[in-house]
Amino acid sequence: MIGRWGVTGALSLRGVTRTVTLDTKYLGLGHGMEGEARAACRATTELHRDDFTVSWQSMLARGIAVVGPSIRIESDVQIVQKG
């Protein structure tokens, strides 16, 4: 699909490294306050707690509420051309 791509790389959490693919969507071009060109995209993925040895028991013990076995991550990114 045009405007979408996968970005794959290594993610390390708590001493565990896994390959993760971000589903990335192009959001468009714009200009910043100083007139610089910017491109925007949104990257999403889902991580499973067990893949990174993050147990719900240890999170609850630290007062962190846990709802399910996976975490959805969304990140909005702006790319700015320099020079």
Image (cartoon, rainbow, N blue to C red):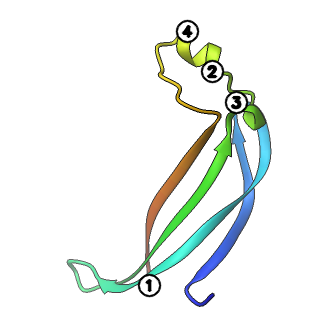
Residue at mark 3 to residue at mark 4: CA–CA distance: 17 Å
Quadrant of the frame with the C terminus: bottom left
Q: Which of the 4 image quadrants contains residue 54?
A: top right
Check residue 83 in the rendering and tell me which mark sits there, or answer none.
1
Image-based side of 23 in relation to 28, left or right: right
Image-based side of 81 in relation to 44, left or right: left
Residue at mark 3 to residue at mark 2: CA–CA distance: 14 Å
Q: Label 1 sits on what residue type?
A: Gly
Image-based side of 21 in relation to 31, left or right: right
Q: Which of the 4 image quadrants contains residue 14?
A: top right
* Label 4 vs 1, first from the N-terminus: 4
CB within 8 Å, label 2 to label 4: no
Q: Label 2 sits on what residue type?
A: Trp
The residue depicted at 22 percent of the width and 80 percent of the height is: 34
In this rendered view, identify the residue nearer to me: 12 or 26: 26
Q: Label 3 sits on what residue type?
A: Arg
